[in-house]
Amino acid sequence: MYWEKEIETLPREKLDALQAERLKATLRQAARSPHYGRVFRETGFSPGDFNSLADVPKLPLTTKDDLRENWPYGFLAVPREELVRMHSSSGTTGRATVIFHTAGDLDAWTNLVARCMYMTGVRKADVFQNMMTYGLFTGGLGFHYGAERIGCLVIPAGAGNSKRQIQLMQDFETTVIHIIPSYALHLTGVFEELEVDPRKDTKVRIAFVGAEPHTEKTRKRIEEYYGWKAFNSYGLSEMNGPGVAFECTAQNGLHIWEDNFLVEILDPETLKPVPDGEEGELVMTTLRREGMPIVRYRTKDLTRILPGPCECGRTHRRIERLKGRTDDMMILKGVNIFPIQIEKKLLDIPGVGMNFLIVLERKGFNDEMIVKVEVAREFFDGDLLKLQKLQRRITDELKGDILITPKVELAEPGSLPKTEGKAVRVIDNRKD
Ligand code: ADP
Ligand code: ZN
């Protein structure tokens, strides 16, 4: 049974006390690593100086660059022979970073993933098809072991090979899947091509969608097209991978497992905590890691804590759907724009299809944004006026929101590039 009721509904004061106790132990453990040993020495901070959660702002922050500079073993807090697994980040924003786990770390991680899946209604009788990349990426093995722990029948399908995915779903009567949201949108075209109706011809009822930012609209599109319940799954390799924050059946924000992670939201400029409920950068500390504890990790992911209790009764706080990374922000003619804003607008417009791509170009002294959008097949029946009308509408709607006029190019369904992994939304050709 993976409804760990007592811990998931622990009253706030007890959760705080548990966090303080685990953080103290984490700091002692971290001090054994070359990196934190040095950082603590240099800053004159000793883990023994830590008394309560009020001391957290005094602790050093950790960045992806720290992990890169200490490649590969500089964060290890245990002898290497204690390690049993290595994973790495996807390398979305530069050189990938590596994370190591002891057997105890893997056990704790597996438990968290099982807890997340159970929370949405996954049970032993389910057939779980994991459509994520296996290997170094955490989304494959992370979910795999979580589902096995619940006792599901696991199909380790891996990413890509769309036709085979649909075949597996049908043959083995898959009930739960794990899929990247942009890939779920792309897959609609393959279902159509094969003339398979996901609602009638498959038994899938739950989908975990995550690993990349996506809007509520995208979730709705997935749910409406397939008839699945889609739950947002957030994680990052530095904090294990999947199983960090997850939606419950209320589908209103993602519970962060605060018995395993300390959560802060900081202003990314001043690095000071923002008032509760305000948006900022998510910063997290592992509270149970043995092999590679990480203190105050700057995720660069933007979100806010949702105020108030959740109707499901869990006391672990919720974060809002993620807006993207601070790195994703595009600056054009002095205007700050996130790809997610474009997605939000586009999916509201009837006729807009399942994929889009933003290309940034420098023309002389001017920056130009080209938005390539797939639109429904019916717009390519030769009626140019209809196509132009849609193009104008998309341009106007985007302009109204992002305040600059993009050049909009309409594309046929399935024609824009699609990767098996996280979607590449922006191609920036402005670099000199
Ligand atoms: P990388 O940081 O190189 O992409 P990871 O595989 O560790 O490598 O990916 C973690 C990152 O993926 C997170 O920091 C976040 O930016 C993004 N991410 C993961 N899940 C979600 C989600 N549900 N919503 C938005 N972004 C997500
Ligand atoms: Zn809840």
Image (tube, rainbow, N blue to C red):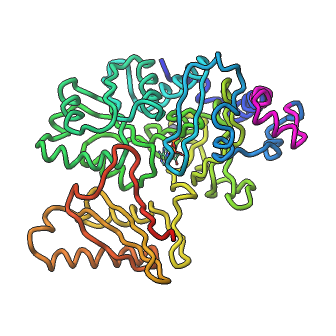
Question: Relative to 173, is 338 above or below?
Answer: below
Q: Going by the image, does 265 lie left or right of 133?
A: right
Quadrant of residue 407 in the image? bottom left
Q: Going by the image, does 372 lie left or right of 415?
A: right
Q: Is residue 35 magenta?
A: yes
Quadrant of residue 150 in the image? top left
Q: What's drawn in magenta, residue-wise?
A: 25-47
* Most foreground residue, 221 or 432: 432
Question: Relative to 166, is 217 above or below?
Answer: below
Q: Is residue 224 magenta?
A: no
Circle count:
0
* Most foreground residue, 31 or 91: 91
Residue 134: percent from left, percent from top: 40, 30
Q: Residue furthest front?
A: 432
* Most foreground residue, 361 or 211: 361
Q: Residue at x 10, y 75 (%)?
A: 383
Residue 235: percent from left, percent from top: 52, 39
